[in-house]
Image (cartoon, helix red, strand yellow):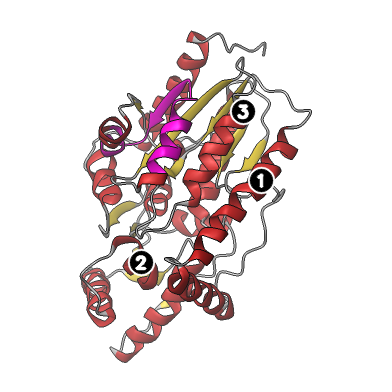
Amino acid sequence: MIINEGYSSNLGDQAIKKSMESLLRKLGYETDFCYFTNPALKNLPVYQYKNKEVGKVRNSRFSIYKKTKHSIFSFFIYFRYFFKIKKQIRAYLQNRSYHAVIIGGGQLINSSKNNAISFFSISLYLWTIAVKKDPTIMLYLAGVGVAGKFHLVEKYLYKKALNKTDSIWVRDRFSQKSLSSNFNKQSILMPDVAFFQEEEFIANKNTNTALVGIYSYNEYIRKFNTAEKNKDTYYKNWLSIVERLIAKKMNIILFYTTESDALETLLFQQYLQTKQLNTQVADIKSLDDLNKLLENADVVCSARMHALILGLKKGCSAETYIISQKLKSFCEEYIDNPKTPEVLSETVYNMFNNQFLNQGLTVTK
């Protein structure tokens, strides 16, 4: 059984799900999938990435949340979510039997940047308790990212959850250090699961096209509590990237991998027009659309880690707009690393295969 955020609107989460399922099928296993934070959702929704109204609604919900995050009402939200997802997990696992459960990949050991509680901590706590009611099931955290700091309740929930796992594999050294310092837990370092790919990798191309993916400004401010509060300054930084690529005679296409980024992309396009720069915005409705776009590009610049990973797998040169420790670690592990996507994919496969063999999870093919 695979559990991650693969039904979210984030195309990076969808890519993780696809790679994990492909990997386990190649190893000879039958798989089920369940959405980590919303087990009741059974299929991938049709997301409207370039619908401006969607962005407005999400921003409106965020404003309401921000106003109530320190109130009694906010604690009611977490209390209600706790019992809602607990019921959903119980219903999903009823009458199902597994040899192993894999939770990951993705940034699943995350923290809220305010005084609230991360929904991920609640979800991981409840999933691990429910799975380990059957002690014969092997429970893995695989290819996960770990935040650096946690609130008191988050720390309690994560510690309880981590104590239920049989093995923990993290995707970067920062996550490995954080897991050790915050929870006194040792882990195995592995490449991000999204690097795994069964089909042939694409070699370098010469399309003279650069993809630029601006990160949602509201999300940037909310998640990273940055001192860069001025949106104009933020846009100027991205403008300098566009101008540098244009100076290299590159054709610029703006792209996105989340709904919030899609809305920001449309606003950034309007900003570029005020600078007499006319740029195209890609029409991305699915992960397949994104992969096709990357197949016809030379360069991908983004602050989304999995946009960069998918670009590397499609033979693109990756440029990281660093906004977090996660992105800094990613650069150190993968951009500055001479290992090719092919080698990283093979490493992921071998690590899973060897781990399962060592713990007796063999299959008859």
Q: Is residue 67 above or below residue 307?
A: below
Q: Quadrant of the N terminus?
A: top right
Q: Is residue 199 above or below residue 302?
A: above
Residue 300: image x %, image y %? 35, 58
For disc 3, the neighbor class at 10 Å (few under 14, some 14 to 19, many from 20) is: many
Q: Quadrant of the C terminus?
A: top right
The residue that disc 3 covers is: 131
The first of marks 3 and 2 along the sequence is 3
- Magenta residues? 154-176
Q: Is residue 112 left or right of residue 134?
A: left
For disc 1, the neighbor class at 10 Å (few under 14, some 14 to 19, many from 20) is: many
Residue 38: image x %, image y %? 63, 50
Residue 313 appears in view:
yes
Give yes or no for residue 162 being in the magenta stretch. Answer: yes
Residue 200: image x %, image y %? 49, 37
Give yes or no for residue 172 being in the magenta stretch. Answer: yes
Helix, strand or loop for disc 3: helix
Residue 222 — which label? Answer: 2
Residue 210 appears in view:
no
For disc 2, the neighbor class at 10 Å (few under 14, some 14 to 19, many from 20) is: some
The residue that disc 1 covers is: 39
**Which residue appears farthest toward the front when viewing the image?**
72
Q: CA gap, disc 1 to disc 3?
A: 14 Å
